[in-house]
Amino acid sequence: MTALGFLYPGHSAEDDYPRMEQLLGSDVRLDVVHTDIGEDAHRVDALLKMGSPERLTAGVEQLRMSGAEAVVWACTSGSFVYGWEGAHDQIRALARSAGLPASSTSFAFVHAAKELGVRRVAVGATYPDDVAALFADFLRAGGVEPVTVRASGIITAAEVGTWGYDEVLALARAVDGPDAEAVLLPDTALHTAAHIPDLEKELGKPVLTANQVTVWEALRLADRKVNAPDLGALFTREPIVQAD
């Protein structure tokens, strides 16, 4: 059994995790601990507070008790808002407090793009323009080039969590273009776990979504690869372990 830990802010799309656990097979467990979201706002000041060491440390002990082998801060905006170096400092502090390998969803996107061998991407963000621009800057710092970025201007994670497949597909289609090798949907408040194969079929290219890459990153930290095609192209790369 491989146990993986996730610190997830608030409650919006956390039900993606039990869905993904089922798709990964019987020997992978995804343990989600909810952190204090504070003010639910895609604003820089609120996001900096949401990703503060105090907020993250509060959930660490519960994850350690669960037997997690690795921990991922399951929040994109609450990590890239610190910038490339600041986000590294954030996960280093998390690793120290947890005593476990650690990462965040922002780094997961960079690592997943490199795993797929894609560099030019389209970004369909639920965030306001200024926050979406910070994610684009973060990707560039990691060697991934956003060729298009679309910001939806949604302020709260709670509203993002109400989106269904039609809204997610519309966002992905709106940002996609011939120059993009993959489409990125960077918000862990967005329900996507049930939609990835359909999105990839519609767009004809890999789709990387926040909760999907977060789980993949935790598996990477634990040195596990699982073949789970229902989670998209990212989960079909030279698997070591076949999902049941």
Image: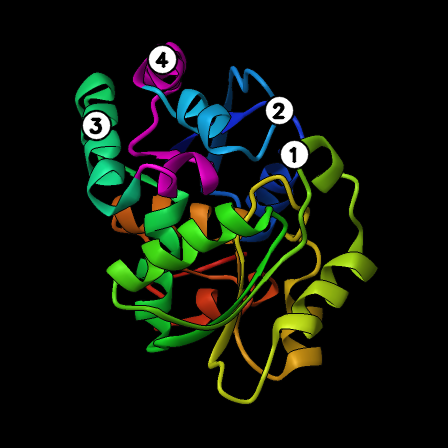
Select label 4 or label 2 by which is in front.
2
Q: Residue at x 68, y 47 (%)?
A: 191
First-in-chain label (4 vs 3):
4
Label pair 1/2, CB-CB below 8 angstroms: yes
Select label 4 or label 3 by which is in front.
3
136 relative to 55, above or below: below
Residue 159 lies in quadrant: top right
Q: Residue at x 41, y 50 (%)?
A: 134
Residue 221 lies in quadrant: top left
Task: Look at mark 3 in the image and give the residue it sits on.
Answer: 95
Measure the C-alpha gap from mark 2 to mark 3: 25 Å
Task: Look at mark 2 in the image and give the residue it sits on.
Answer: 40
* 74 in magenta: yes
Which residue extends farthest bottom?
178
- The front one of 41 and 112 is 41
22 relative to 8, above or below: below
Task: Look at mark 4 in the image and give the residue it sits on.
Answer: 65
Crowd around label 1: few <14 · some 14–19 · many ≥20 (10 Å): many
Q: Amino acid at mark 4?
A: Met
Task: Look at mark 1 in the image and give the residue it sits on.
Answer: 157
Locate residue 199, reporting x and y percent: 68, 70
- The front one of 135 and 64 is 135
Label pair 4/1, CB-CB below 8 angstroms: no
First-in-chain label (1 vs 2):
2
Q: Amino acid at mark 3?
A: Ala
Select label 1 or label 3 by which is in front.
1
